[in-house]
Amino acid sequence: MPVVAEELGTVAAYTWAFSAFMATSIVAMVVAGLWSDSRGPREPLVAGVVAFAVGALVAGAATGLGVLVVGRAVQGAASGLLIVAVYVLIARAYDEELRPRAFSVLAAAWVVPSLVGPFVAGWLAESVTWRAVFWLVPVFVVGPALLLFPRIGAYEGGHGIPGAGRRVLAGAGAAGALLGVPAGLLRVSVLGLAEAVIGLVVLCAAIRPLLPAGALVFARGLPTSVMMRGLIAAAFFSAEVFVPLALVRTRDLSVTQAGMILSVSAALWIVGSYLQGRVPADRDRSRLVRVGASVVVVALAVLPVAVLTPVPAWVAALVWGAGAIGMGLAIPSVSVQVTRLSPPQSLGANSAAIQIIDAVLGAVVVSVLSLGHAYAELHGGATAVTYALLWFGSAVTGVAAVALAGRMRPTTS
C-alpha cells in the first residue's frame, strides 16, 4: 500500500482503501448471516469467492484512487460473505468441544499465506509492479474453492428469517454512515468534523438492530462478547494500518522489509491461537480474552520505540509479534464464546454481528487516526512522533477491551 499510495498520489487519503473494504463488508456480513441461517453457508461461500477474484482484478487495473476504492469495495463485500459463512460452517460442522481447535486451525490456514504474502507483495511492488499483487489473487483462490464447495452441502439450512429486509437496509445505512465518517474527517475542517459526527450518530442507530440486544451498552454475556471482538480488533488493526508506512518513511526500510515484519506477526499469531485451543470449550473465555487484550495494549505502548529511537528495526518485528500472540489468544476465544452462547437458529446472525462490529469499530478508529495522519501530511508530512501518537490512540481502544472483558461472563459468579 505505501507503493500504491505514492504512485497514485493518494498518500493523504491512504486509509480510504481500507475504509472502503470495511464499509462494504458490513452489508455483505448482514446478507451472509441471513443467507447462511436460511439456506446454509454454501451459496454465500461461492458468491464470496467469485466476488473476491473480480475485486482483485479491478483493484489491480486502477489508474486512480476511485477505481482502486471500487476494487477494494468489491473485495470487502466478498470478504463479508466469506468470513460469516465460514464461521457458520464451523459452528454447524463441529461439536462444541472441538470448536476451539477448529478456530485454531482456521487461524493456521492463513498463517502460511500471511508469512509469504507480505514478503512477496513487497518484492512484487518494488521489482515488478504492485498490480501483480492483486492480479495473482484469482490464481490462488479458485483451486481451493473447487475442493471446498462439494463438501458443504450437508450443512444447508431451510427456514425463513423474519425482518430480513430491514436488517439489510440497516446494514446499508451503517455502510453509508461508515463511509461518511472518514470522508468528513479527511476534510480536516469544522464542516468535515460535523459531517463525521453526524455519520457516527447514524452509524450507531443503524448497527443497533444488527447486534444482540444490549450490545451497545455492554450487557453481560453474549452482547459484550460480540462487542469485545470489535474493540480488540480495532486496537490492533488500526495500528497495523500504519506499521509498514511508518517504517518505510521514518526508518528507511524497503517495502519488502516492512512486509517481513507483518510476516513475523502472522507466524506468532498462530502461537496464541494454538494456546487458546488447548482450553476446554465449556470454560468461560473472559479471562483469556483479557490476557490477550492486555498483551496487545503493551505491544502498542512499546511499538513507538521502533520509530522514536535508533533501536534496530527488528525490534518492531518482536514487539508487533508479541501483540499478534495476544490477538491469537483473544480473537478465537471471542468466537468460541459467541458460538457457545448463541442459540442454533441465530448462529448466522451472531456470526455476522461479531464481524460487523469488527468492521465498524475498526473503520471508526482508523478514520479517527487518519485525521491526525492527514493533518500531518498537510503540514509538512507525518513524522515519527505522528506515528507514535497514532499507536497510542490505538492503545486506548485496547485498554477499553481489557476493562470490559469481565462482562463477557453471563453472570458475576
Image: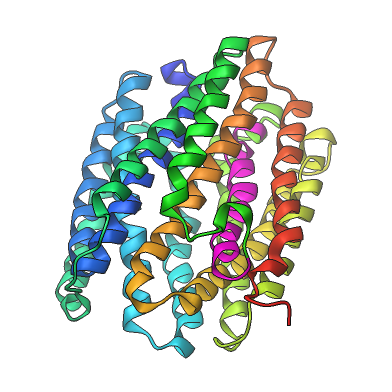
Is residue 222 or residue 121 the one in the foreground? 222
Residue 402's place in the image compared with 239, above or below, is below
Q: Is residue 308 left or right of residue 2?
A: right
Protein image colouring? rainbow
Q: Quadrant of residue 232?
A: bottom right
Say which residue appears at 73% left-offset and 38% top-offset.
393
How many discs mark residues in the rendered view?
0
| Left or right of residue 159, residue 281 in this image | right
Residue at image x 25%, y 60%? 162
Give above or below for 235 relative to 191.
below
Q: Quadrant of the C terminus?
A: bottom right
Give the image location of residue 177, x and y in percent.
Answer: 44, 31
Main SS, magenta residues: helix
Percent of width and height locating residue 92: 32, 80
Q: Is residue 8 visible?
A: yes
Pick the front one: 67 or 319: 67
Left or right: where does residue 338 sit relative to residue 249? left
Taking the magenta stretch, the answer to whether it contains residue 337 is no
Q: Is residue 117 visible?
A: no
Taking 279 as reference, is 294 above or below it? above
Say which of 114 and 260 sits in front: 114
In the depicted structure, whether residue 208 falls above or below residue 382: below
In the depicted view, which residue is nearer to us: 38 or 395? 38
Asked if residue 231 lies in the magenta stretch, the reply is: yes
Q: What stretch is highlighted in magenta?
A: 220-246
Q: Position of residue 378 (x, y in %)?
A: 63, 10
On the image, which quarter does residue 381 sit in?
Answer: top right
Q: Place residue 75 in its image quadrant.
A: top left
Give the side of residue 217 with respect to residue 103, left or right: right
Where in the figure is residue 29, as x and y percent of width and height?
35, 53
